[in-house]
Image (spheres, rainbow, N blue to C red):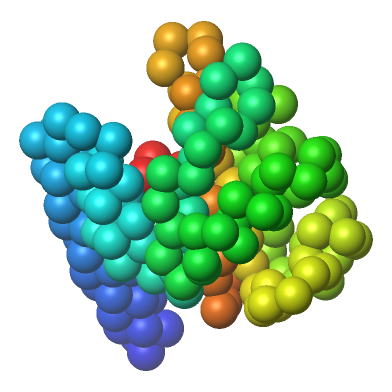
Amino acid sequence: LSRSNEGREDARMEAGSTAVRATALQDVTAALSVASTTAEIATAVLTRGLRAMQASRGHLVLVENGRIVQVIGAVGWDDAEVTQRYSGGDENLPLIRAIRDKHSVWLRSATEYEACFPKAGTGSGIAPVDAHLALPLIHGDEVVGGLAFDFAFCPAIHATDELFTSLL
């Protein structure tokens, strides 16, 4: 009987957590639905999206012909630092891979980040992260932007966590 009660309590907590996440996702979607400029989109994604994801920092880039052409905005990063990161021609970066492959790149630990992208975390002022998510932003078949989030913890413990994050 005790295990049954524990199971119900766990299910209740999970349902509450899912409801909170769905509300946060809806908040981001609502902000994006009224955004009419690039700056408004960046603000919606980098404020509400960052909060919904519980990320410590993030940045949004514009992509043309498969290349990052502009840093639209950044939170927790200096815009110039992000611009420098992508202007060096280094193809060994998570967001570059996500854009090229048209798939999200999840790095669930600092160890995994370093193993997959050994030179990406080096450089002045780049703080280490525990988890990282790089998302291509696709319209039709074309990648039009990229979004990267850094986390002080790994938010995607279960497949449902990763699905929620990707829905953003």
Kindly indicate the quadrant of the structure image that contains residue 152.
bottom right
Q: Position of residue 26 (x, y in %)?
A: 17, 47
Furthest residue toward top: 141
Observer able to see residue 161: no
Q: Residue at x 70, y 38 (%)?
A: 96
Q: Is residue 103 above or below residue 15?
A: above
Going by the picture, which residue comes out furthest to the bottom?
Answer: 2
Work out whether 60 lies above or below 38.
below
Please name the residue shown 61% across and 62% down the image.
Answer: 81
Q: Is residue 51 left or right of residue 64?
A: left
Residue 156 found in image quarter: bottom right
Depth check, front residue: 23 or 138? 138
Looking at the rendered structure, the number of numbered marks drawn on it comes to 0
Q: Position of residue 165 (x, y in %)?
A: 44, 50
Figure quadrant of the N terminus = bottom left
Q: Residue at x 42, y 83 (%)?
A: 3
Residue situated in front as seen by the camera: 1 or 145: 145
Residue 68, image x, y percentages: 60, 33
Q: Is residue 46 visible?
A: yes
Left or right? Give the position of 1 relative to 82: left
In the picture provided, is 83 more to the left or to the right than 168?
right
Quadrant in which the C terminus appears: top left
Q: Position of residue 49 (x, y in %)?
A: 32, 55
